Amino acid sequence: MKTLLQQPDLRKEFPVHAVATKLEKLISETEVRLRAVTESESERRPAPGKWSKKEILGHLVDSASNNHQRFVRAQLGQQMSFPGYAQSLWVEAQGYQTETWENLVRLWTSYNLHLLQVVSRIPPEKLANPCIIGDQEPVTLEFLVRDYVRHLEHHLSQIQD
């Protein structure tokens, strides 16, 4: 079976092709490692006030959700403004600590597979579209895509420690 990025209808000259390839590999490799984590291990907080593996993965689901909107909407306009979000409040409000690890892994995996498709379909001419998040300086859609993968890598390394 061909991977998403090997399908002939996708652009071979895609400017963030390497990032999409990296995301695809990250999803595939990470899902296996996440499924090896036990429920009790996923609930353990490394220190008071620190997130458990469940909460970190929940935060990554929130990141996927917010970036999904950005990746799609930024293609539709010349300059888009998006709200920031209070990460800790989102994690707390959604109760990721009480969610099952299996459900969180499934949600994270499915959402990121969808984002992979979204990213793979961004027209190259849209990658330069400016985006403003909260009160930050404008960045390009391409920057957001690259930063999303960097952010994933950072937090996934915390889960795998």
Image: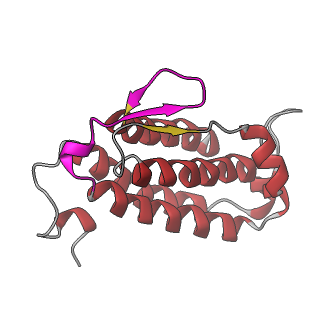
Q: Is residue 37 above or below residue 62?
A: below
> Quick one: which residue is furthest to the right in this view?
48
The residue located at (80%, 35%) in the rendering is 50
The residue located at (60%, 30%) in the rendering is 134
> Quick one: which residue is furthest to the front in this view?
78
Q: Quadrant of residue 7?
A: bottom left
* Apparent side of residue 57 relative to residue 10 in the rendered image (left or right): right
Q: Which residues are magenta?
A: 122-139
* Apparent side of residue 49 relative to residue 12 in the rendered image (left or right): right
Give the position of the N terminus as an image quadrant.
Answer: bottom left
* Apparent side of residue 56 relative to residue 111 in the rendered image (left or right): right
* Apparent side of residue 12 relative to residue 154 in the rendered image (left or right): left
Image coords of residue 151 (percent x, y): 51, 37
Q: Is residue 137 above or below residue 66?
A: above
Image coords of residue 61 (percent x, y): 61, 55
Give the position of the C terminus as an image quadrant.
Answer: top right
Query: Is 97 one of the magenta-colored residues?
Result: no
Image coords of residue 14 (percent x, y): 16, 49
The residue located at (26%, 44%) in the rendering is 126
Q: Is residue 105 above or below residue 71?
A: below
The residue lying toward the viewer, choosing from 109 and 76, is 76
> Quick one: which residue is furthest to the top in this view?
137
The residue lying toward the viewer, choosing from 122 and 99, is 122
